[in-house]
Image: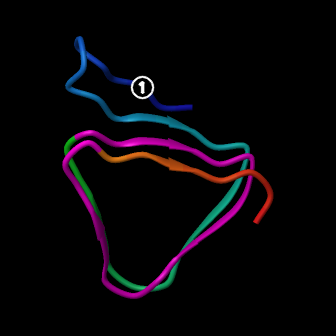
Amino acid sequence: MESYDYRYNRTLLSIKGHVHFNGKTKIGFGSKISVDGELFLGKNFHISAASTIICRKK
């Protein structure tokens, strides 16, 4: 569980499970990531702006 919001300047992260980084990854500005399972991010994965990733299971 990670957090930071400072009123919408985001990076909220809640992982119960695993995140697999298969190479370099850049996660930027509006990040909100919640996993509860397994998340696989490929080589040279980039996400930014008003980001959101939700993964339940795989």
Vertical position of residue 14 compared to residue 18: above or below: above
Spot occupied by residue 26 in the image (x, y as percentages of width and height): 27, 65
- Name the residue located 22 percent from the left edge and 55 percent from the top edge: 48
Q: Is residue 46 left or right of residue 33?
A: left
- Name the residue located 73 percent from the left edge and 43 percent from the top edge: 16
Q: Is residue 38 left or right of residue 57?
A: left
Asked if residue 51 lies in the magenta stretch, the reply is no
- Name the residue located 23 percent from the left edge and 11 percent from the top edge: 7
> 10 Å neighbourhood of mark 1: few (<14), some, or many (≥20)?
few
Spot occupied by residue 53 in the image (x, y as percentages of width and height): 49, 51
Question: What residue type is disc 1 on?
Answer: Ser
In the rendered image, the quadrant that contains the N terminus is top right
Q: Provide the residue designation for mark 1.
A: 3
Looking at this view, name the residue that lies furthest to the top: 7
Q: How is the image coloured?
A: rainbow
Q: Is residue 8 left or right of residue 21?
A: left
- Name the residue located 49 percent from the left edge and 84 percent from the top edge: 22
Asked where in the image residue 10 lies, by quadrant, the reply is top left
How many marks are shown on the rendered structure? Answer: 1
Range drawn in magenta? 30-50
In the rendered image, the quadrant that contains the C terminus is bottom right
Q: Secondary structure at mark 1?
A: loop
Asked where in the image residue 29 lies, by quadrant, the reply is top left
Vertical position of residue 33 compared to residue 25: above or below: above
Q: Is residue 53 left or right of residue 28?
A: right
